Image (cartoon, rainbow, N blue to C red):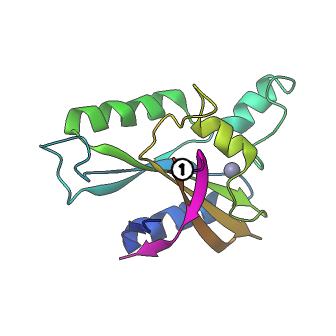
Amino acid sequence: MKPVIIRKANFDQIVTQAEREFPFECCGFIIGGEAVRGGGADDTVEEVRPIANIQNLKHAEDPIAFARDARTAFLMEPREHLAVMNEIDRRRLNLSAVYHSHPDHDAYFSATDRAQACSFDPGEPDYPDTVYIVISVRAGKFARAAAFRWDPAIRDFAEAELETC
Ligand SMILES: [Zn+2]
C-alpha cells in the first residue's frame, strides 16, 4: 500500500494540537492539491485546518444522545467543517486527510472511526481517496501516529506507512 507522506511542519502542528487538547480528542483536516480532481489543482498546497471538537458541548446538552464526552469522541463544529468544504471547492483542492487524536489510547482505527468515515454506506467510505490519521497521546505527550487508507480489495481501511518530508 502506498505510504502516506505529509510535511513535517504539518505533522508537528497536528501533534501540538493533539497534546494541547489532551485529555480530549482533537480533530481537523489536511487539505491539499494532489491533482486527483483534474487540472487546476496546485500540488504544492498542503495545509492543516484544525476544527473545534464540540463533543463536550453536545454531551453536556444531551448526555443520552451523546453518551461519550470528548475524551473518547469527537464531533466537528459544523460551520468550521462546512467552511473547509467550501474552501476546497473554491480553491479546487482535495480533502487529503481527516485526523483526530486518541487520548490515552492507541493509534488504531476504531469501529466508530470506521462508521464515521462511511457515514452514508457502511461498505463505502464518504471520501475514498482521503487518508485518516489517528494520533495517540498518552499523559499529554505524543506517543504514536498511524495512517489508514481505504483498501477496495478488502473493502475496509488498512494501515499505511506514515512518513514526513
Ligand atoms: Zn478514533
Q: Nearer the viewer, residue 134 or 60?
A: 134
Where in the figure is residue 92, as x and y percent of width and height?
Answer: 22, 39
Q: Residue furthest front?
A: 153
Q: Residue at x 38, y 37 (%)?
A: 84
User: Is residue 160 covered in magenta?
Assistant: yes
Q: Nearer the viewer, residue 83 or 105?
A: 105
Q: Residue at x 59, y 58 (%)?
A: 158
Q: Which residues are drawn in magenta?
A: 154-165
Residue identifier under label 1: 153
Where in the figure is residue 81, as x and y percent of width and height?
Answer: 47, 34
> Label 1 sits on what residue type?
Ala
Q: Is residue 4 left or right of residue 60?
A: left
Where in the figure is residue 31, as x and y percent of width and height?
Answer: 35, 49
User: Is residue 15 covered in magenta?
Assistant: no
Mark 1 Cα-neighbour bin, 10 Å: few <14, some 14–19, many ≥20: few
SS category of the residue bearing label 1: loop
- Answer yes or no: is residue 74 visible: no
Where in the figure is residue 133, as x and y percent of width and height?
Answer: 55, 58
**Height in image: 157 above or below 63?**
below
Q: Residue at x 24, y 56 (%)?
A: 45
Q: Residue at x 67, y 54 (%)?
A: 109
**Height in image: 100 above or below 135?**
above
**Height in image: 45 above or below 140?**
above
Numbered marks: total: 1
In which quadrant will I find the C terminus?
Answer: bottom left
